[in-house]
Image (cartoon, helix red, strand yellow):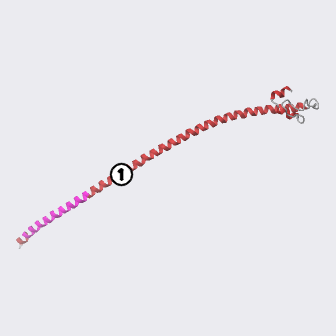
Amino acid sequence: MASSSGASSGSGSGSSMLQNSGSEEDLQALMDQRKRKRMISNRESARRSRMRKQKHLDDLASLVTQLRNENQHILTSLTLTTQKYLSLDSQNSVLRAQVNELSHRLESLNEIIDFLNATNGAFGPPGPPASLFEPDGTTCFFDSLACFSQQPIDMLLQY
């Protein structure tokens, strides 16, 4: 019986070897299949990653173009604003000079009026007017000072 059990164990081990080699082949095939799936999955993941990177680059390039256009618009606006500022500044300078000149003229005219008012009664009551009308046709009978203030400076100095 011992020999029969040895023979059967030998033949049993041969079939188990076949089973082992069959299961090893199945295991190897399963591992190869998993490896292929993993490789395909990795390739697909890498492709999606490249697509995301490309989309990100395209978005950044679009943003650069948009910002350059916006920058150009701002520079144009700044140039126009600067030109308007310089124009208004020169106009303000002219107006300030005119205000200064007119203020001096007003001050001079006020001094002349003050002088005429001060000297008007200095030599007694005013005499009758030389005529009711001045050479330009205005009436000076009621307010001789008004006539003086209406005259140009050269005419006032002649009286």
- Left or right of residue 42: residue 136: right
Q: Residue furthest bottom?
A: 1
Q: Is 159 or 102 nearer to us in this picture?
A: 159
Q: Is residue 25 magenta?
A: yes
The residue depicted at 20 percent of the width and 62 percent of the height is 27
Q: Is 119 or 136 nearer to us in this picture?
A: 136
Q: Which residues are magenta?
A: 7-36
The residue depicted at 62 percent of the width and 36 percent of the height is 87
Disc 1 residue type? Answer: Met
- Left or right of residue 111: residue 24: left
Within 10 angstroms of label 1, few (less than 14), some, or many (20 or more) residues?
A: few
The quarter holding residue 112 reads top right
- Left or right of residue 58: residue 113: right
The residue depicted at 53 percent of the width and 40 percent of the height is 76
The quarter holding residue 45 reads bottom left
Q: Is 42 or 66 nearer to us in this picture?
A: 66
Q: Secondary structure at mark 1?
A: helix
Quadrant for the C terminus in the image: top right
Q: Quick check: 97 above or below 73?
A: above
Please name the predominant secondary structure of the magenta segment in the image. Answer: helix
Residue 142 % position (x, y):
90, 36
Residue 74 % position (x, y):
53, 42
Residue 104 % position (x, y):
76, 32
Q: Is residue 42 magenta?
A: no
Q: Is 10 or 70 nearer to us in this picture?
A: 70
| Residue marked by disc 1 | 51
Quadrant for the N terminus in the image: bottom left
